[in-house]
Image (cartoon, helix red, strand yellow):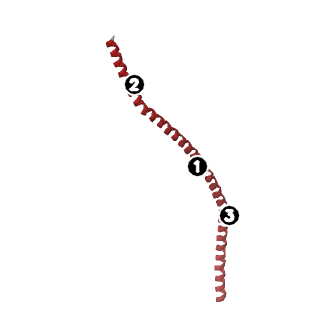
Amino acid sequence: GEQLRADLAAAASKHAAELQRAKDSAAPTAAMVQTLKAQCSTLASELELAQEQGEQLRADLAAAASKHAAELQRAKDSAAPTAAMVQTLKAQCSTLASELELAQEQGEQLRAD
């Protein structure tokens, strides 16, 4: 009986020591798990914020693109009459140049006569 008690006490002591080692090694693991959970939570918050900022940026860019498209259309619309006016003025200048050339020829003819 004494031997059995001694064997059981030795086994209990051995298992208690193993249990303590397991607890000691589990403590840093639990701390690491908590740290990783906190980091994941932080990263999730940062990702959500980045997504919101990305959506806002997309909306801002779409608004800016729309505004610039409208400004470009207005510029094109105002340029069309200007281009037409330039063509008209070129034609008038060409006509005036022809008339001037004709008048000079007539003037030279008059002088000659």
Question: Residue 50: x and y, percent?
Answer: 55, 45
Q: Which mark is residue 81?
A: 3
Position of 7 with respect to 73 (left or right) is left
Q: Is residue 8 above or below residue 40?
A: above
The residue tagged 2 is 19
Question: Residue 93: x and y, percent?
Answer: 65, 74
Viewer-nearest of discs 1 and 3: 1
Q: Nearer the viewer, residue 30 or 37?
A: 30
> What residue occupies the far front of the structure in this picture?
2
The answer to which of marks 1 and 2 sits earlier in the sequence is 2
SS label for mark 2: helix
Q: CA distance from mark 1 to mark 3?
A: 37 Å
> What residue occupies the far left of the structure in this picture?
3
Q: Nearer the viewer, residue 59 or 48?
A: 48
Q: CA distance from mark 2 to mark 3?
A: 92 Å
The residue tagged 1 is 57
Question: Residue 8: x and y, percent?
Answer: 35, 16
Residue found 67% across the figure and 62% down from its top: 78
Q: Which mark is residue 9?
A: none
Amino acid under disc 3:
Pro
Amino acid under disc 2:
Leu
Viewer-nearest of discs 2 and 3: 2
Position of 70 with respect to 34 (left or right) is right
Q: Could you classify mark 1 by the number of other residues whose Cα lies within 10 Å: few (under 14), some (14-19), or many (20 or more)?
A: few
The answer to which of marks 1 and 3 sits earlier in the sequence is 1
From the image, which quarter does the N terminus lie in?
top left
Q: Could you classify mark 2 by the number of other residues whose Cα lies within 10 Å: few (under 14), some (14-19), or many (20 or more)?
A: few
Amino acid under disc 1:
Leu
Residue found 66% across the figure and 76% down from its top: 96
Quadrant in the picture for residue 88:
bottom right
SS label for mark 1: helix
Q: CA distance from mark 1 to mark 2?
A: 56 Å
